[in-house]
Image: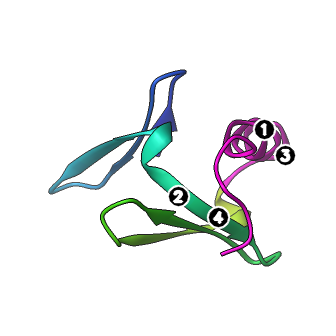
C-alpha cells in the first residue's frame, strides 16, 4: 500500500490498483482495521497493525475529506 496527494495504491505480487482519494465514499476505523468503501461499490480492509503510527495518522488525515461513518 502506498499513497500520494492524488491517489492511494494497493499492490500485491500479481496486481496493482490505484484510486483517487475522491473515489473513497466512506470509511470507518474499528480499531482492528480501516475499512474503505469506494465509489464503484468495492470495499477494502486495511489491518491497522500493518501501518506504523505516523503512516496511520497521515492516512486518517487524508481520509478526513472522505465521507466518514459508513
Q: Which mark is residue 25?
A: 2
The mark nearer the N terminus, 3 or 1, is 3
Report the Cα–Cα distance between label 2 and label 3.
24 Å
Specify whether 64 is left or right of 9: right
**1 vs 25: above or below:** above
Residue drawn at (48%, 40%) of the image: 22
Q: Which mark is residue 61?
A: 1
SS of the residue at dot 2? Answer: strand
The mark nearer the N terminus, 3 or 4, is 4
Report the Cα–Cα distance between label 2 and label 4.
7 Å
Q: Are marks 2 and 3 in contact (CB under 8 Å)?
A: no
Which residue position is annotated with label 4? 27
Could you tell me residue 31's position as x and y percent? Answer: 83, 75
SS of the residue at dot 4? Answer: strand
**25 vs 10: above or below:** below
Q: Are marks 3 and 1 in contact (CB under 8 Å)?
A: no
Which residue position is annotated with label 3? 53
Q: In this rendering, which labeled residue sits more in front, label 2 or label 3?
A: 2
Amino acid at each position: 500500500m502506498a499513497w500520494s496527494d492524488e491517489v492511494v495504491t494497493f499492490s500485491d505480487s500479481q496486481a496493482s490498483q490505484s484510486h483517487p482519494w475522491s473515489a473513497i465514499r466512506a470509511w470507518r476505523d474499528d480499531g482492528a482495521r480501516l475499512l474503505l468503501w469506494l465509489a464503484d461499490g468495492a470495499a477494502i480492509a486495511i489491518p491497522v497493525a500493518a501501518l506504523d503510527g505516523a503512516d496511520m495518522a497521515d492516512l486518517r488525515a487524508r481520509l478526513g475529506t472522505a465521507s466518514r461513518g459508513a
